[in-house]
Structures are given as structure tokens and as C-alpha cells.
Amino acid sequence: MVQSVSDLNREEIRRALTELVGQDQVCVDEDLLRAASVDRFKKYMAVNGIYIGPIPAALVSARSAGEVAKVLRFANDHKINVVPRTGVTSTEGGLETVVEDTIVLDGSPMNEIVRIDPVNMMATAQCGVVLQTLEDAVRLQGLTTGHSPQSKPLAQMGGLTATRSTGQFSTLYGGIEDMVVGLEAVFPDGTICRIKNVPRRAAGPDIRQIVIGNEGALCFITEVTVKLYRYRPQNNEYRGFLVDSMDDGIDVIREVVTDGFRPSVCRVYSEEDARQHFDDFYKNKCVLIFISEGPKAIVEATVAEIDRVVARIHHEDVDPVRIEQWFSDLNWGMDKIIAEQEWMRTEHNLGYTTEISANWSDIGEIYEAATHRIRTEYPYAADLTMLGAHSSHSYQTGTNLYFVYDYNINCDPQDEITKYHIPLNAIIVEEALKHGGSMVHHHGIGKYRTDWTEQEHGSAYYMLRRLKDAFDPNGIMNRGTIFKA
Ligand SMILES: Cc1cc2nc3c(=O)[nH]c(=O)nc-3n(C[C@H](O)[C@H](O)[C@H](O)COP(=O)(O)OP(=O)(O)OC[C@H]3O[C@@H](n4cnc5c(N)ncnc54)[C@H](O)[C@@H]3O)c2cc1C
């Protein structure tokens, strides 16, 4: 726990916040405050009703950028830690309130779709708009954002931008960093900045990228404008193959992508990971998946390329209908979260993930090295019920790996993260860095990869640290996130 350095105590903070934004926007309900002290990194403790961190002083609902500015200015003046939040699907501890008497500032009431502009192909949404809601609205006009993280039914535009999120169709549309045209953000001194919507400019560095991925450690995002694309699901083509190894699958994806084709989905699942997704047809093989979308001629050319490249390796075709069916049930709404809670409670078993990226030539070695170390060095490997990975986001120069590990919990709930999640995550992160990769592909650094932030950035850490010092000199923004507490 980090002690508060504020000149105000818990009661004084609550009173001042009530004066600033009104009583109905300041929640001090103890159960809600406890829940607001963690995110999914501590999901097993939470499901067992155990909250060991400092419980926030208040959960404040913000209804406008002006209110965000008021709260941040007040917190900055009195050195009170602030944790921004929107959809609460964070997985890496980004929402944990490690400082005593923190204010959790909730942007979810800012939930208006401001504008859908089909001529200039962009949509503007406040930070609390759920991505699924925005996607449903633009689809009514035959358009799509192209953004489809698995958390689409729950995650909101502010958090999606703050974490540098990516989606299932990223090989075609890119990550959120490729989608954001302009945005509005509020800094700790109360300054409200709007970055205008233009197709490109060379007016100095791209300042959007300071805000995108800041994880609430530099500023609060209040509005986002994203690009739109034409939605043509009738042209979609699904392809699935059983292949002999991850290396074979990754080689096929590399060739298709570096030849200049952009299927929206390119994935390969290790045998173990395939078992949990495709139990009825995977036959102890790795599963390779493609979806091609867009104008018909482009789809046809992309499918021809996939078939040409895959023909070179030993493989078996999968009925495309099975891939389409599997894909249609991939996203997570509250129903799956509740089912997962029930599973954890009754089975004392859970699954976590660690996602990294690397160049084509290094990714296979990272997979082998990390899984080998976990199986041979990790003292509680016998408790693992699944260890596998898939590559799901590919680029001209390389790809990601999404490691998935499930385990039985043979300890007290409060020891679960130190016995299992933290050491397993550490092995994967260490191997990614050792092989020249990135320790985090799309979930953000949160509070559990900060030990390696300096190593991740090397000499460029200077720039990252300077940004924090410049924009948040009092260190009030989400202490312990990106940077060590
Ligand atoms: C089942 C499941 C599937 C997932 N699938 C994906 C996936 O496919 N791709 C992917 O990228 N991620 C995925 N995630 C992770 C998560 O959904 C993303 O990180 C998402 O972007 C978080 O959005 P949110 O609105 O829920 O943010 P929150 O959980 O509320 O916050 C996330 C982080 O952003 C900060 N933050 C939130 N709002 C703001 C704001 N307005 N201004 C500044 N900082 C803010 C918070 O402080 C925190 O550090 C998944 C999570 C779950 C639970």
C-alpha cells in the first residue's frame, strides 16, 4: 500500500468532491468501493470477497469534460491519486487503487454518440460509449469501425483508447492507434485538449499517440473520433486448416501478409489451445484460421493467395461453416463473466493470458522457450490444466503470441496471484524481452509488468519518463500503472 500524501483526509476528500460535482455523483458505498479497488488481475480474490488493497475514498461519476477537469484540478492541488475508468474490463491491474484514499473517476456516464459522419467516414463518441453500441449504430448505415476486441460488448471508448486495444480484425483495420482520428483529453491541471480530426498532418510529432495507450497515467480521455469503413459481411470468406505445428501456421501467415494481402483475421492455435476452442475437429493438430473481408474482388484474391500458400504444407481443410460458427460466439458479455465467476467459485480453477509480440524470426523461439521453461522450471507446473498459445494479430514485420494458461488453485485465495499468475506471467515476459520482442502486445502494462517497463523501452525510457514528469508532475494519475508505484 502507498500512503496518501494529501493534505486532506478521507472525509474531507468526500466532502470536497460532493461540493464539486454534487452528492448524487459521489458514491461512498463500501461494497462498490471495494469492488472498485481491483480489476480482473485479482478476479479470484474478488470472487471470494477478498480485497486486500487500499479501498478508494470515493467513486465519482463524471458527466462532462468540464467535470473531469474540476475533479482532476482538485486532486492535483491536494495530491490525491486518481484512477480513471470506463468499461471495467481491465486485465492487468490498471484499475487497482494502490494509494490510500484514491478517487476512482468513472467516465461511463459520458455515453453519447456525438456524430456519425458517413461522408468523411468517421464517428465521434464520448468515452463511456460501449464499443458494441457504437458498432451497432454505424452498422445501421452500412458501416463498421473495424474494431472488435473480445470485450466489445463491455469495453468503452475511453478505456479502449487508453489501453492501445486491438481487435480480432486487426490485420486489416489495425489497432485503435490506427483508428483514432482525433480526441479530447483532460490533463491533471485541468487543461482540456482537443486534437482535431484531419486525415494526416506533418505539424510536428503525432500527439495522439501520447494519449493513446496512456492507461490513465497521463490524462483522462473524454471523447474519441474513429475511422469508419464499409460493412460488407455478405462477401466474407472463412478458411480453416489443421496443420502440423505452430511454426507451419506462422509461416503461412507470414507469407500471406508479407506478400501484401490483408485477411482481416489470421490466427494459428497451438494444439493445447486448439483443444479448448475446437475440441470437435482439431484432431490433436494446430488450427490455422483466416477471414477475408471487403470488396468482392479483394476477398477473392486474398482467398486465392491463402489457398496457394497453404497448399505448400501438409494440412487438412476444415469446413468453413465451423469456423464461422465458432467466430460468432467468441465475444464476452456479462453472461460469460458471470459463468466464469461461478466456475472459479466451484472448481477453484481459472485461466489467464499474457500477450507479447516479436519479429517473424523470433516468435517461434519465444513460444518454445516460454513453454519449455514453464513446464520444466516452474515449481507448480503440475497444477496447470492447460498451457498453450495462439498468434492472432499479424503485421508486415512480425506477429503476436497470446499465451493462455489455466490452473487449479491449491492455496488460499489471497496467495493465488503470487503462487501462479505473477510467476507464469514473468516467465513469458522475460522470454519475450530476452528474444528482442515486446513484453505486451495489447492489454497494457497495468501494475504487474512495471518491473520491466525500463527494459522494454531501453534508452527510449527517457522519453516515457519525461512525459510522465511533464504532464503529471505531482504523480496523481493512476499511481503504479506503467511506472512503478
Ligand atoms: C473477456 C475479455 C476479453 C478481452 N479481449 C480483448 C481484446 O480482444 N483486445 C484487447 O485489446 N483487449 C481485450 N481485453 C482487455 C480490455 O477489454 C481492454 O483493455 C479494454 O480496452 C479496456 O476498456 P475498458 O473500457 O473496459 O477500460 P477499463 O477497464 O475501465 O480501464 C482500462 C485502463 O484504462 C484506463 N482508463 C479507462 N478509461 C479511461 C479514460 N477515459 N481515460 C484515461 N484512462 C482510462 C484505466 O485506468 C485502466 O488503466 C479483454 C478483456 C476481457 C475481460
Image: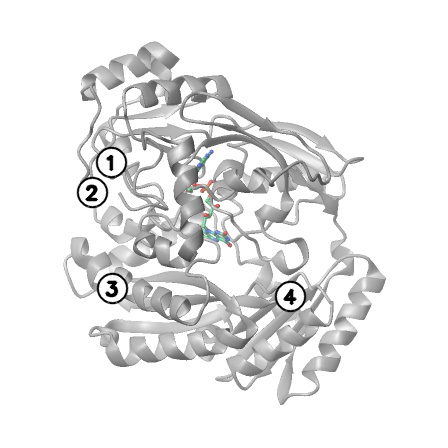
User: Which of the pair 223/477 is nearer the observer?
Assistant: 477
The residue sitting at 59% across, 58% down in the picture is: 328
User: Which of the pair 392/218 is nearer the observer?
Assistant: 218
| Amino acid type of the residue that numbered disc 2 sits on in the rendered structure | Tyr
271 is higher (above) or lower (below) than 424: below
Q: Earlier in the sequence, mark 2 or mark 3?
A: 2
| Amino acid type of the residue that numbered disc 1 sits on in the rendered structure | Arg
**Badge 1 local density, few (<14 within 10 Å), some, or many (20+)?**
many
| Amino acid type of the residue that numbered disc 3 sits on in the rendered structure | Tyr
Q: Which residue is mark 2?
A: 51
Ligand 1 lies under 8 Å from the Cβ of mark 4: no
Distance (Cα) linking label 1 and label 3? 23 Å
Distance (Cα) linking label 3 and label 4? 34 Å
The residue sitting at 74% across, 49% down in the picture is: 231
Q: Which residue is mark 3?
A: 420
Q: Which residue is mark 1?
A: 34
The residue sitting at 58% across, 57% down in the picture is: 168
Residue 196, horizontal then vertical, whole percent: 66, 30
Q: Which residue is mark 4?
A: 396
Q: Earlier in the sequence, mark 3 or mark 4?
A: 4
The reply to whether residue 272 is visible in this rendering is no
Residue 75, horizontal then vertical, whole percent: 32, 22
147 is higher (above) or lower (below) than 74: below
Residue 123, horizontal then vertical, whole percent: 67, 35
Question: Is residue 393 found left or right of 371 in the rendered image?
Answer: right
| Amino acid type of the residue that numbered disc 4 sits on in the rendered structure | Gln
Element type where label 4 sits in the image: loop
Please identify the quarter of the rendering in which residue 214 is found: top left
The residue sitting at 48% across, 54% down in the picture is: 442
Element type where label 3 sits in the image: helix
